[in-house]
Image (cartoon, rainbow, N blue to C red):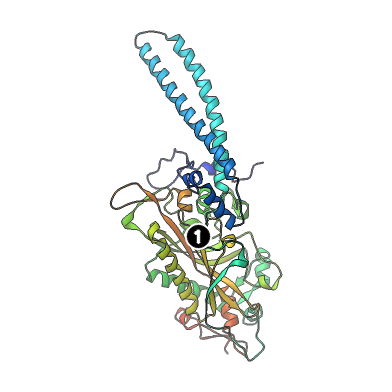
Amino acid sequence: MKAWWHREHPLAHAPRDHPGADPAAPVDRTEQSAMLDVTLIRQHPDQVRAGLRKRGADADIPAFLALDDEFREARAAVERLRGERRRISAGIDVRRRTDDPADELRAEAKAQAERLAEAEAGLAGLAARHQEFLDALPNLPDDDVAAGGKEHNEVLRSVGAPPAFAFPARDHVRLAQELGLIDYQRGTALAGNGHWIYCGEGAALEWALLNHFLDAHRRAGYEFVLPPHLLTYEAGYTAGQFPKFADEVYRVDDRFLLPTAETALVNLHRGETLDERDLPRRYVAYTPCYRRESGSHRTADRGTLRGHQFNKVELFQFAKPGDSDAAHLELLARAEELVAGLGLHHRVTKLAAGDTSPAQAKTYDVEVWLPSLGAYAEVSSVSNAREYQARRGAIRYRPAGGGKAAYVHTLNASGLATSRLVPAILEQHQRADGTVAVPEALWRWGLPEVLGAA
């Protein structure tokens, strides 16, 4: 049986469902929405290979170029045969009006139809191979992104200092249990490993964080949306997660549960051409995130640090290409400001190419310090996909001064994810008596100044 995301799956060819789209028109991704610009691959194959190798990936570009030539020749041949079919059909129509049976033209039309059917079948096979190759290509990293894996990540800055305790510090799991904030045992009983239940002041802390983040982003001009949690294959494809990671999501019939709100937000304008005067479009969303991946019993994965479901506020922008670098830094500043506002020691890291998501060209991580681990944990991933996702989703903008429509750039940032922030707050703000000081920024949401105080 084919995988559910296979090209023959009906979702793989779902009609575009944006306003004004023809619901009967199939999605034609060939060339118009290739992930990487096919012209770039044709004209600068060495540049493409160099970019892929920075990720530790490689692709047989010469073999693709040979396939590309064959594909384009086959497509041109099909168009010639279709033109010939139209010519023959027109001749039959003319002869019919004079009561001429046009037997020789009808015989020619039949033979032409057979030749066309054979040529179209050959073209379909080439097109599938052509698209399969393009689907597998990740985005090219920016020039200033280091080659290699996470060992080559670059720490750009560190803010504040790790807390120094004059008492035996507790870890976040112990603090959460002793203060009655999180019930790990019942969460596992309800849903299995990788799940937990926020309780009492723990639930209030979680909800206060989400309210605090949403309020800050709305005041900054981001439009608040609550997207559906069940998405179609086309949504995952546009985001750059499918087909490669299609087996890593939770399936529900012919839909999947979103792994991050980014997957929904990038599709808000799928198939649309926006007006330049409406850019940037800035959105903020809250959703739970559903991931098949989960942690282990390792210390680094305990508690809420890694699970199958967690809460996150997500920021997303559709920007003009010339503005996307500034937009990227603005998103990073927003994420970092929130972490700093919670009084947390953190750092900002620029990821190396091999540690960057396949759909992204450049990523900064904001990472909080966890004293019990003696390590940092990412709470916001701030990324610029350039035009990679826009090509997959056919998202363009029309220049205000006229001219050809161009692809937008798409950017996203966690703003923020809470499942690692809560452990960081508990550990960094703990006190000798086992209580935890609540960051002042959260008091307005009904939390006490101290968790666990008598």
Q: How many marks?
A: 1
The picture places residue 243, in percent across and down from the top left corner, at: 58, 49
Mark 1 nearby-residue class (10 Å; few <14, some 14–19, many ≥20):
few
- Using the image, determine if residue 274 lies above or below residue 76: below
Q: Could you say which is closer to the camera, residue 81 or residue 269?
A: 81
The picture places residue 286, in percent across and down from the top left corner, at: 48, 65
Which quarter of the image is occupied by the N terminus? top right
- Using the image, determine if residue 249 lies above or below residue 13: below
Taking 229 as reference, is 306 left or right?
Answer: right
Q: Could you say which is closer to the camera, residue 373 or residue 355?
A: 355
The picture places residue 121, in percent across and down from the top left corner, at: 55, 29
The residue at the point 42 percent across, 50 percent down is 395
Q: Could you say which is closer to the camera, residue 28 or residue 70?
A: 70
Which quarter of the image is occupied by the C terminus? bottom right
Tag 1: amino acid: Asp
Which residue is labeled 1 in the image? 143
Q: Secondary structure at mark 1?
A: loop
The residue at the point 51 percent across, 54 percent down is 239
Would you say residue 86 is visible in this rendering? yes
- Using the image, determine if residue 403 lies above or below residue 224: above
Q: Residue furthest left?
A: 401
**Res 357 quadrant in image:** bottom right
The picture places residue 163, in percent across and down from the top left corner, at: 58, 85
